[in-house]
Image: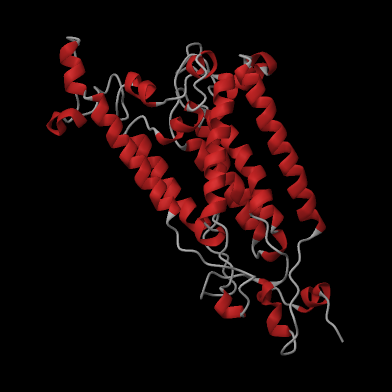
Amino acid sequence: MAVGDDDLENRMSAKDRGIGSRGGDRNRIGPPPLPVALPSSTEFGDNALSSRWTSWLVPMFVVANVVVFVVAMFVNNCPKHFESHRLRGHCVARFLGRLSFEPLRTNPLFGPSSHTLEKLGALEWSKVVEKKEGWRLLTCIWLHAGVIHLGANMLSLIFIGIRLEQQFGFVRIGVIYLLSGIGGSILSSLFIRNSISVGASGALFGLLGSMLSELFTNWTIYSNKIAALLTLLFVILINLAIGILPHVDNFAHVGGFVTGFLLGFILLARPQFKWLARVHMPQGTPLRYKYKPYQYLLWLLSLVLLIAGFVVALLMLFRGENGNDHCRWCRYLRCVPTSSWRCDDI
């Protein structure tokens, strides 16, 4: 008699429903909020269930960001431009020569000047819209304001990106990273006109967003799902809350997160099946791995929303529309005025 998926699920104990990392305990979900590594094909004998890739794209992204930062410092050449303009101030770490940092009163993050960042492709509304330099929507995600900025983003990328690439492969994670970065740049340009923006934060928030939607769309194959969901939501909310501090581009964070969240439903869906049910089935019984109707619905809805969102946002941007005119309260996503700081010049 054939055994259905639902019967198997009902027969499985709570202990058996856990999903462990490769070669590890079956009851372990792994360190939240990172997604759980599915059992390897050698454990269950079916390559269609789960693959394990070697992460190389994320390390390349890290190297690329570091190289671009070094190039930016080389182009910046703090000692030369300070002497040529007879400016007051001392470059930091002058022993580095032309790689030395701008004075801390100019850039407290130990990095180049805003003029250098602008020259190398920083995001600036006037150049994107009035001068039609749309390529800045992409180049800005490879630039960083300083060593502190670079270090924080690259540590986050390593911690989040490598695990995701190992589970889903470089193509899908690379698409999510790049499109999320561009999505963050577009939203930032729509709402911010009086400053430049750089950094990979939008792309990183896209990876976080894709982790959240991946958890939803693959909900039935996870154990300890509530704990993983709460932990991931806590991490996301804390990072978004930090974004309301002055001089932090929270619009890039929000735009990247929403883009990644939608892409997670499109690119990271897995066939739904109780992966450990094989131990309860007679020898030789074929396993069925199928996508649920809700996964198809989420895939279609997310695809439509993603395409519509990009089209509408790009049309608004290149028409020169100001996002603040359509959303008065949205300015509080970037800066909330307090007794310690004002947001008038932000």
Answer left or right for 231 relative to 16.
Answer: left
Q: Position of residue 130 (x, y in %)?
A: 53, 13
Residue 270 higher or lower than 332, as above or below: below
Query: Going 61% across and 20% down the picture, which residue do you hit?
Result: 317
Nearer to us in this view, 236 or 282: 282
Q: Position of residue 215 (x, y in %)?
A: 65, 55
Query: Going 41% across and 36% down the picture, which residue do you hit?
Result: 142
Residue 180 higher or lower than 53, as above or below: above
Residue reaching furthest to the right: 1
Residue 51 higher or lower than 300, as above or below: below
Viewport quadrant of the N terminus = bottom right
Q: Position of residue 198 (x, y in %)?
A: 43, 29
Q: Position of residue 110 (x, y in %)?
A: 28, 30
Query: Going 48% across and 51% down the picture, which residue do you hit?
Result: 161
- Taking the image as drawn, is residue 125 in sight? yes
Answer left or right for 16 relative to 244.
Answer: right
Nearer to us in this view, 138 or 246: 138
Residue reaching furthest to the left: 95
Query: Going 54% across and 75% down the picture, which residue do you hit?
Result: 25
